[in-house]
Image (cartoon, rainbow, N blue to C red):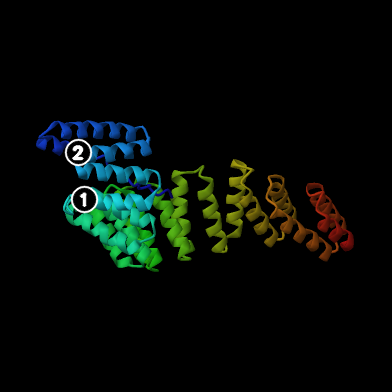
């Protein structure tokens, strides 16, 4: 599942309103300086832009614009305390009526870990601009940080009302339900979204993930199989399916899936280790050895433990020739492992 990213978007406020109150040459000069500062900002020259924004304000340019854009510049430079102070100035100059400054200030509070302040400030911004979908989504994230899942759900439901096409909201809603332990609500949310958006195949995968997390392996297998029919070459998806099959005690089916994965990508070492483990449990030691060796040759040192277990199993079954041959292969792969060499010398 890929969750759609939601990015904090800085707003370049151009002080067009100031043109209506130009009364003298000084103000006109201030606005020209403001335009120059905006060009510097657009070219990511933030320190120089800040200097010109200050100069523009001194020359009579709109104080909301200069403060807001100064704050944007500080934010881009990751100077959060300075950005917060400048956004506050923009809010004060606007008489508390400039929603973009409040929304950006809330985002800065979030970055600073001041989640209570972030919640309160987002709510102020949304009282002025209730159609700001991103602000509702960020408000939900801030609520989550404070542990207020009910507030987070309410904010996300509002965001969904405003933009029903944004699938990231569905994922966020379901994640909150999961955090609350309400798996059935999470499942219903994703199922409903998938019915409305059947082209969004990642919903199927995510639904399988929820079932899997809730240890409902049978339902997870069904969801993953349906997804595999649509995405037959998705190795990670096939691996998840194999994992659920194994959890559901269908090891032989899981082995078939893992073989399929490794035919697609022999470098998928987690699948090789998993295949080795399942084969070992089935007492298919040759297959287990081949799987572990494949993983080892591709750099997964976890294979050592599986191969060691095979050696001990051969010794236990009095198959000393097989045990020595497997030990030889291990040492061939790990010639500098002195501990392994000593262990095998003592064993034989």
Residue 343 visible in this rendered orientation of the protein: yes
The residue singled out by tag 1 in the image is: 99
Relative placement, left or right, of 246 versus 95 is right
Quadrant the C terminus occupies: bottom right
Q: Give the mark toward the camera: 2 or 1.
A: 2
> Which residue is depicted at the point 33% across and 60% down?
142
Q: Position of residue 255 (x, y in %)?
A: 61, 54
**Label 1 environment density (alpha carbons within 10 Å; few <14, some 14–19, many ≥20):** many
Mark toward the start of the polypeptide (2 vs 1) = 2
Q: How many marks?
A: 2
| Mark carried by residue 123 | none
Q: Which residue is mark 2?
A: 61
Mark 2 neighbour class, 10 Å CA radius: few under 14, some 14 to 19, many 20 or more = many
Residue in view at x 52 percent, y 49 percent: 236
CA gap, disc 2 to disc 1?
20 Å
SS for callout 2: loop
Q: Position of residue 112 (x, y in %)?
A: 39, 57
The image shows residue 174, relative to residue 1, as above or below, that is: below
């Amino acid at each position: 599942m890929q969750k759609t990213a939601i990015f904090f978007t800085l707003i370049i406020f151009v002080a067009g309103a100031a043109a209506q109150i130009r009364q003298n040459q000084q103000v006109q000069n201030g606005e020209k300086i403001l335009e120059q500062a905006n060009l510097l900002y657009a070219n990511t020259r933030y320190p120089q832009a800040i200097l010109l924004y200050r100069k523009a304000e001194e020359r009579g340019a709109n104080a909301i614009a200069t403060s807001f854009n100064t704050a944007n510049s500080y934010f881009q430079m990751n100077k959060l305390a300075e950005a917060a102070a400048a956004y506050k100035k923009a809010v004060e100059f606007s008489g508390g009526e400039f929603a973009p400054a409040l929304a950006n200030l809330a985002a800065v509070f979030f970055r600073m870990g001041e989640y209570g302040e972030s919640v309160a400030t987002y709510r102020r911004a949304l009282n002025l601009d209730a159609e700001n979908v991103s602000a509702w989504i960020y408000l939900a994230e801030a609520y989550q940080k404070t542990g207020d899942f009910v507030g987070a759900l309410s904010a996300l439901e509002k965001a969904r009302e405003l933009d029903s096409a944004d699938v990231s909201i569905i994922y966020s809603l379901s994640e909150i339900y999961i955090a609350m332990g309400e798996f059935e609500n999470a499942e219903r949310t994703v199922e409903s979204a998938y019915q409305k958006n059947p082209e969004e195949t990642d919903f199927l995968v995510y639904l399988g993930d929820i079932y899997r997390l809730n240890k409902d392996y049978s339902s997870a297998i069904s969801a993953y199989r349906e997804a595999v029919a649509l995405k037959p070459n998705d190795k990670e998806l096939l691996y998840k399916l194999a994992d659920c099959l194994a959890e559901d005690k269908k090891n032989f089916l899981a082995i078939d899936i893992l073989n399929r994965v490794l035919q697609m990508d022999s470098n998928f070492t987690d699948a090789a280790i998993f295949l080795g483990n399942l084969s070992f449990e089935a007492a298919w030691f040759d297959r287990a050895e081949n799987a572990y060796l494949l993983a080892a040759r591709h750099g997964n040192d976890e294979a050592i433990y599986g191969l060691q277990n095979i050696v001990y199993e051969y010794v236990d079954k009095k198959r000393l020739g097989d045990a020595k041959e497997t030990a030889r292969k291990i040492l061939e792969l790990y010639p500098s492992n002195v501990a392994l060499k000593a262990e095998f010398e003592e064993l034989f």
